Amino acid sequence: MKGLFLFFAVTSSLALAAPSLGQIMEYPFDTNPEWPVELIDILKIDYERNTKASFCIRPIDMVDTVVIHHSETSSTASAKYINELHLARGSADDPWYMIAYSYVINSPYPKGSIPLPLVTEGRPLEIVGAHAGSNVFMPMDDEQRKMWEDKKILCGKENEMPAYDESLVKDGKIKANVTTVGIVVNGNYAPFSKSNPGGYSKRNPRYPTDNTQDMIARLSCQLQKKYPRIKYIKWHSYYHSTSCPGSIKSYIGRIKTLAKGYGCEFN
Amino acid sequence: MRIQLIALLCIFSFSLHASDDKSMKELFAKYDQIMDEHKVELVDEVFTQKFLEHNGGKEEFIAKVKELPKVKKRKGMRSLLQKWKKSKVGRIFFTKVKDSNVKPGKPSHESEFVVIEVDGKLKIDGTLSDSN
């Protein structure tokens, strides 16, 4: 009986796994994982997608890093709104498939607007994100290199045959988006400037609340408990010059400490 | 007949683009005036009400503008506006901007402004963090 259950569990997980060469690209993949530890509720919503856009799929074991962003939108922006903007941001030459991040954290500012504290799932984890910078390449460890060489990362359009895209790797390094998962905190945590009119005032700096830090820690830890190869928490400006994620960057150390309290270890 | 129709469509779309381009340049000229010269009386013309509300209200926004140093307009000074494109969905425009006032060594901030049409006029509705 136990063996039969195991057989069904294995075959059903295979059916939901990302496609391999020779199998068409289908959405939504395995978007309903069973979490071994649930530290936070994750809301699932349906997104509009641009089926004319290409995207890449990966085994989630390729992912070793969580990357923290801020959206720069208002703190009340919904994941659906960010998806609309990301779809609209694409052009005919460079269409965007869907929201660039895998998770959206809504959390209140210390003062001001008070959105619901909420985590919403964005782009499924099996789909390579579009957040760390498309021209940023990072070294691979042996397991990641093997997955790459075994052609486990494939690109294409919905309902089409995927292909092996050699441009994902350069000089032995792989695009950072392939090995990371993007978590965006709704809101604008960078200072006000001419190019950032939604930023905070010097008189009233904006920092992630304890609740926001805790939500990032819980979500990161929940991901690590399910996918133990995830062992780093980084921030957007770690990968290239950007003001994202603003003041949240200063709290990454504290977020790691909070995650430790939930039984997770991040470097 | 078909060639004439295509030519007419081309002229129509070109004039639409030119009109959008003119409106966009005007919008960002006013934006420059607010940010560089503190002409805060233009705030309602440049930003949507929603944007101002989400940023602590008009008074708070004006106070933030006044914290910025005034910049005298010099001949040949480049506008913040780099390039813009119209979204295929509705009347949303994405305008790429780069802050030329960033000090060397500091992270440069290149973000996209979300511009929408309100009562036939273009207004800034917010920004979107860089990601790709």
Image (cartoon, coloured by chain):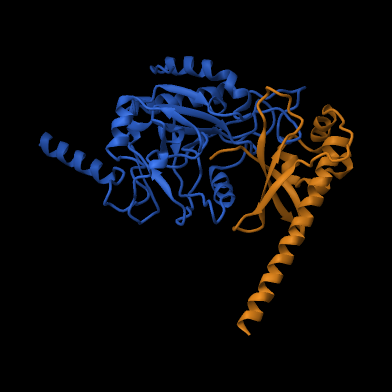
Chain colours: A blue, B orange
Of residues A34 and A15, the one drawn nearer to the viewer in this rendering: A15
Q: Position of residue A87 (x, y in %)?
A: 54, 50
Residue at horizontal 47%, vertical 23%? A233
Q: Is residue A68 above or below residue A26?
A: above
Looking at the image, the residue that sits furthest to the bottom is B1
Give the tally of numbered discs.
0
Does residue A244 appear to the left or right of A126 in the view shown?
right
Q: Position of residue A108 (x, y in %)?
A: 61, 30
Of residues B115 and A105, the one drawn nearer to the viewer in this rendering: B115
Q: Is residue A58 visible?
A: yes
Q: Quadrant of the N terminus of chain A?
A: top left
Q: Quadrant of the C terminus of chain A?
A: top left
Residue at horizontal 79%, vertical 49%? B27
Quadrant of the image occupied by residue B10? bottom right
Does residue A63 appear to the left or right of A147 in the view shown?
right
Q: Is residue A123 above or below residue A53?
A: above
Looking at the image, the residue that sits furthest to the front is A171
Q: Position of residue B45 (x, y in %)?
A: 83, 49
Of residues A177 and A257, the one drawn nearer to the viewer in this rendering: A177
Q: Is residue A127 visible?
A: no
Q: Is residue A214 above or below residue A93?
A: above
Does residue A101 appear to the left or right of B100 in the view shown?
left
Q: Position of residue A163 (x, y in %)?
A: 34, 49
